[in-house]
Amino acid sequence: MHSAVFAQVPPSAFSGGDREARRRVQDAANNELLLARLSSHGGSAARGAWFACTLVALRHAADPEPLVATGRWPGTVLAAPRGAGGFGYDPLLFIPALGATVAELPAEVKNRVSHRAEAARAMRLLIEQVWRP
């Protein structure tokens, strides 16, 4: 199952609107379903989660040695959403090291410390070390 369509929202729920409007409806449904499924889990230790990013670089379609870099951003799933920024599960993932949900972080902070930023840094190092451009 893809996390972007965790809650299988029927097409009838999307009465017109643009792509972003449809995404907001889907995101709200996904968050609601996640919270419902986690409602029986008490403390924050049982609600640990993370965002993950995997990047793959190929020199060509049949590259026998692709480069693979990953990044993880650990946090805790809150019992209710907080913050207005971001998308998807951002309002639910609390990052203890930053004292905020992903949706509460300024874009410049998020872009510097996120799972995507970590994976991009790792990929850059791999490219420099292995391919030596």
Image: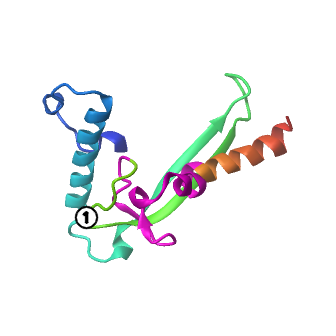
Under mark 1, the amino acid is: Ala
For image coordinates 77% across by 40% down, the residue present is 127
| Residue 121 screen position, x and y as percent | 69, 50
In the rendered image of this protein, does residue 56 appear above or below residue 73?
A: above
Disc 1: which residue: 80
**Residue 70 visible in image:** no
Q: Name the foreground residue: 132 vs 17.
A: 17
107 lies left or right of 19 = right
25 lies left or right of 1 = left
In the rendered image of this protein, does residue 43 appear above or below residue 93?
A: below
Q: From which residue to which does the magenta span run? A: 87-116
Q: Name the foreground residue: 21 vs 72.
A: 21
The quadrant the N terminus occupies is: top left
107 lies left or right of 31 = right
For image coordinates 46% across by 72% down, the residue present is 96
For image coordinates 21% across by 69% down, the residue present is 40
In the rendered image of this protein, does residue 95 appear above or below residue 131?
A: below
| Residue 124 screen position, x and y as percent | 73, 44
Q: Name the foreground residue: 108 vs 76.
A: 108
Q: Residue furthest right?
A: 132
| Residue 31 screen position, x and y as percent | 27, 52
In the rendered image of this protein, does residue 110 appear above or below residue 23?
A: below
Location of residue 129 (image quadrant) = top right
For image coordinates 65% across by 46% down, the residue present is 120
